[in-house]
Amino acid sequence: MSPRKLAFSLLQKAETNDQYLNIALDHALEASKLNELDRALAATLVYGITERKITLDYQIERLSSRPTDELDLAVKTALRIGLYQLIYLDRIPPHAAVDESVSLVTRRASGFVNAILRAFGRDPHLRFPEKENGIAPYLSVAYSVGLPLVEKLLSAYGEEATEEILRGFAKTPPTTISVNTLKISREELAEKLSAEPTEVSPNGLTVRGSIRALNGFSEGEFFVQDEASQICVEALGAKGGDLVIDVCSAPGSKSFGSAIRMNNKGKILSFDLHEKKLSLIRSSAERLGIDIIEAEAHDGRDPIPELFDAADRVLCDVPCSGFGVLAKKPELRYKDPAASAALPNIQRDILENACRYVKRGGVLVYSTCTIFPEENEENVRAFLKSHPEFSLTPFSVGSFVCPEGMVTLLPNIHATDGFFIARLVRNS
């Protein structure tokens, strides 16, 4: 199977089922006999076309007499594959992009696909709706984000900031790892991998290539963790000998970072609602040489009375809408924010329960990987109104300073995932 045929198959399946794109792609590549270059092209096409779907469909509609939602799925997918190569992949000759895409469809449809792609080739310029006719449709097409999500961003951030945020999400983020300093120093691993240190996090490196193929992975010298998540671990500030409770821990990177910060001394209780996710935490902890983590299935909304007033540090990294990671999960670009309307209530329930575990003088960190106020600042402010025994407290990580005690990290400003952190201390 060619890389384009693999992408053609996966992209059509993605339109009709809810399987995570990265998992489906990994399985398909594993089963294929493609070489590394072809595997890379297949992955680029799958992720890139998913990321640029609205932009591509707008170009198809202006070149066609039929709306894209009336086109056969196979035809639409072949057109997306062809246009994506013509627009975004400058190393592929235009004739190859056209011919290979035409070959994906039946003979009956080939003339139509060929005509559309050659029409774009004669005038290879992207077109967008005019801003004067409405900023939301323009941003939706220009940055390939669903209209409901664009409108929600505009409501929360305004026109200028929204476009800057979307521009930040349009950039391909680097792969960031956290160094396991129980086994190796950051300087040693950076030299070993020819990697660059992260801007803020003291343990982060940015790397290229397949993670599992990197020197030191199997030896447990690092684990994958975005710099925003590493900053969250530093804000929690766990120390050797602490009792730490990670209320919603999967996939476990913040528990791992805290254990390393504690020099593997003390105890971390890593809870998660789903038992099936805990095996990954346990196996990764073993690979990293961490033995202070106890992973157990537990609903963060249910109290554990024997842990009340017991923990030095509690991390409440709640389930969220995930709109801070659009750059890494392109399918989220088309998710309707209305589907996440119930989350703030769930988040408040988890926070309300988690605060019971914090001892006097202890630290509570509330975090999400989204950028909307109702899941972030509004939850924290509501919590503080009913819990005067807690207060926000400033924190700093390297050159980054958060004097207010809570911050929304944004890709266009901080070069990280979109992420929210609030650091609170129990005073009484």
Image: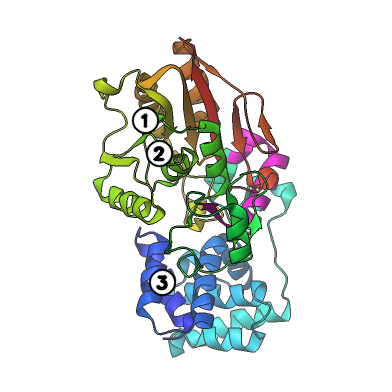
Magenta region's main secondary structure? helix
At horizontal 51% and vertical 66% (from top left) the residue drawn is 47
The segment highlighted magenta reads 153-179
Residue 256 located left or right of residue 231: left
- For label 2, the crowd category at 10 Å Cα-Cα, with few meaning under 14, some 14 to 19 and many 20 or more, is some
Check disc 1 and give the amino acid type. Ile
List x then y, in percent, for residue 65: 57, 72
- For label 3, the crowd category at 10 Å Cα-Cα, with few meaning under 14, some 14 to 19 and many 20 or more, is some
Q: Is residue 247 above or below residue 171?
A: above
Q: Earlier in the sequence, mark 1 or mark 3?
A: 3
Total label count?
Answer: 3
Check disc 2 and give the amino acid type. Pro
Residue 173 appears in the figure: no
The magenta stretch spans residue 340: no
The answer to which quarter of the image holds residue 83 is bottom right
Residue 349 located left or right of residue 362: left
Q: Which residue is mark 2?
A: 319
Per the rendering, the mark at residue 193 is none
Q: Which residue is mark 1?
A: 346
List x then y, in percent, for residue 156: 61, 34
Confirm or deny contact between disc 1 and disc 2 (CB under 8 A): yes
Q: CA distance from mark 2 to mark 3?
A: 28 Å
List x then y, in percent, for residue 162: 66, 43
